[in-house]
Image: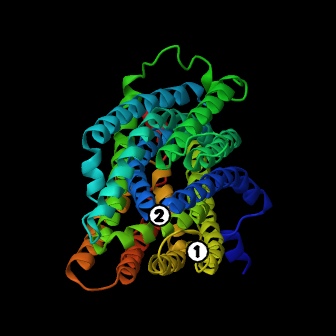
């Protein structure tokens, strides 16, 4: 019993370190998703078409968000290991790399959304539905998208700084900046969606304007605060003295980081494609999934934060060259993540019958949303395991393996399963959704084998010397 406890569970010091990293991330993401949930409910009060239009655009922009996440994550593997060595010049190189790639991805996103926005939105409107509702959904979605594009550069800069700070173990400043932005978003949403306190009632346009304003504030806070504290953040000294990056560093980051960029891009596109497959069953499904995903995002912060904790803690230990400690720590983090998220799943399942009632939509949509929430809750422990396994592989630079493990599996198994069941069977959306989630069990088995074999135990910054 003692041996099991020592292998799978840490001491008080271990959990203190985990909580110091994970809790600020959970708080920031939790408040963000809670406000997003309130935004969603506010928009849902206007009508189903407005809610569906915004939901579709957010699904499209989710691809961009994850592209940026992939761009900063590739360099971030090196940031965490450089920090483990206290190599500030190395960290500066990774920040510059993040900025260059972020700018490129943002410009591409602008071009695609401006030129092909209506086409992208229309891809989700192929199922059953009244023609007027479909046109209204397209109209609201286009309005929302054009304004939201103004916030992309600010989102990118925030992610560059926030990811770097987190990889250095500093999670409080990103949390504070996120909270300030969230409060601004909530207040302006209330005023601009409904026209309160003399402001115009702009509906979905108001929601987009509020989001853009909040992102500007978040960027300003995190950038100014980081540069005003060079003692605490020594990597900012001389950060912009040059934007050049040594060729050998660029080469290594590209080799290790490009699979992550592709992974996040293809995975996000896979999620968007899954939503498209589900939407073949009609606009009611789009609305129900929007409600389900909104509350799921709030509860998913548990395993998302734990995944980032795995990447940061294990990455720093690998950078210090302590492979035995890295393996032992990773095992304890995975066990803790699954146990924590099992408790979260119970709470989510319990509130499933209540949450859909906050939306101004039909009873059929509410019932479908409730059941989708319950199914999602059942699979949260599995998602926690998958997320921890993925970030473990990533922390040691095994990004090609992570790419196949994550996005290739999503396209070859999840999307194929969803499309086949939606197109060629008469199964209800609930069973289709359940079976798609169930296919991830195979991914969990594959990931467990890879992690247990220790293929991820590498100090990649020493290999660059």
- Judge left or right: residue 390 versus residue 115: right
The quarter of the image holding the C terminus is top left
Which residue was labeled with disc 2? 451
Q: Which residue corresponds to the image point at 34% horizontal and 57% vertical from the top-left?
A: 136
Q: Which sits in the foreground, 13 or 4?
A: 13
Question: Which colour assignment does the render follow?
Answer: rainbow
Q: Position of residue 376 (x, y in %)?
A: 50, 74
Residue at 62 percent of width and 50 percent of height: 313
The single residue placed furthest to the right in the displayed view is: 12
**x and y percent of residue 138 in the render?**
32, 54
Return the x and y of residue 166 as percentages of the image width and height: 61, 42
Q: Is residue 398 visible?
A: no
Q: Secondary structure at mark 1?
A: helix
**Residue 43 drawn above or below residue 427:** above
Please tell me how crowded label 1 is: few (under 14), some (14-19), or many (20+) other residues with Cα within 10 Å: some
Of badges 2 and 1, nearer the viewer stands: 1
Marking on residue 131: none
Which quadrant is the N terminus positioned in?
bottom right
Residue 368 in view of the camera: yes
**Residue 357 bears which disc, if any?**
1
First along the sequence among labels 2 and 1: 1
Q: Position of residue 296 (x, y in %)?
A: 54, 67
At 43% from the left and 39% from the top, the residue drawn is: 147
Label 2 secondary element: helix
Compared across the picture, whether 356 is left or right of 60 comes to: right
Residue 350 vertical placement versus 282 (above, below)? below
Q: Nearer the viewer, residue 407 or 127?
A: 127
């Amino acid at each position: 019993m003692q041996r099991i406890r020592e292998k799978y569970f840490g001491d008080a010091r271990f959990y203190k370190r985990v909580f110091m990293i994970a809790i600020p991330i959970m708080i920031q993401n939790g408040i963000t998703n809670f406000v997003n949930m309130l935004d969603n409910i506010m928009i849902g009060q206007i009508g189903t078409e407005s809610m569906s239009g915004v939901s579709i655009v957010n699904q499209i922009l989710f691809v961009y968000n994850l592209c940026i996440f992939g761009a900063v994550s590739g360099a971030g593997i090196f940031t965490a290991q450089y920090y483990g060595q206290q190599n500030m010049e190395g960290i500066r190189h990774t920040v510059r790399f993040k900025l260059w790639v972020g700018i490129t991805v943002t410009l591409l996103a602008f071009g695609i959304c401006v030129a092909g926005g209506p086409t992208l939105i229309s891809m989700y409107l192929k199922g059953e539905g009244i023609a007027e509702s479909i046109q209204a959904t397209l109209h609201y979605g286009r309005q929302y998208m054009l304004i939201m594009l103004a916030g992309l550069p600010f989102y990118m800069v925030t992610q560059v700084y926030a990811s770097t700070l987190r990889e250095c173990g500093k999670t409080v400043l990103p949390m504070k900046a996120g909270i300030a932005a969230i409060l601004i978003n909530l207040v302006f949403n209330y005023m601009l969606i409904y026209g309160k306190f003399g402001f115009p009632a702009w509906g979905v346009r108001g929601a987009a304007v509020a989001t853009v304003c909040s992102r500007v504030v978040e960027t300003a806070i995190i950038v100014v605060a980081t540069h005003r504290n060079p003692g605490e953040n020594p990597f900012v000294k001389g950060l912009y003295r040059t934007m050049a990056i040594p060729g050998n560093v660029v080469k290594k980051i590209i080799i290790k980081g490009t699979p992550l960029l592709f992974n996040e891009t293809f995975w996000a596109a896979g999620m968007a494609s899954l939503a498209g497959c589900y939407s073949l069953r009609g606009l009611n499904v789009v609305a129900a999934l929007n409600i389900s995903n909104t509350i799921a995002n709030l509860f998913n912060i548990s395993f998302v934060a734990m995944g980032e904790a795995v990447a940061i803690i294990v990455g720093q230990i690998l950078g210090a060259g302590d492979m035995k400690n890295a393996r032992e720590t990773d095992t304890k983090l995975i066990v803790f993540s699954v146990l924590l998220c099992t408790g979260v799943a119970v709470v989510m399942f319990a509130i499933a019958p209540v949450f859909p009632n906050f939306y101004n939509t039909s009873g059929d949509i509410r019932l479908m949303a409730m059941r989708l929430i319950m199914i999602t809750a059942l699979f949260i422990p599995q998602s926690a395991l998958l997320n921890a396994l993925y970030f473990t592989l990533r922390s040691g630079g095994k990004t090609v393996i992570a790419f196949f493990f994550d996005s290739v599996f999503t396209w070859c198994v999840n999307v194929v399963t969803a499309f086949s069941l939606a197109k060629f069977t008469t199964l209800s959306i609930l069973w289709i959704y359940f079976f798609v989630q169930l296919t991830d069990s195979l991914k969990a088995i594959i990931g467990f084998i890879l992690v247990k074999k220790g293929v991820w135990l590498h100090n990649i910054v020493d290999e660059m010397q």
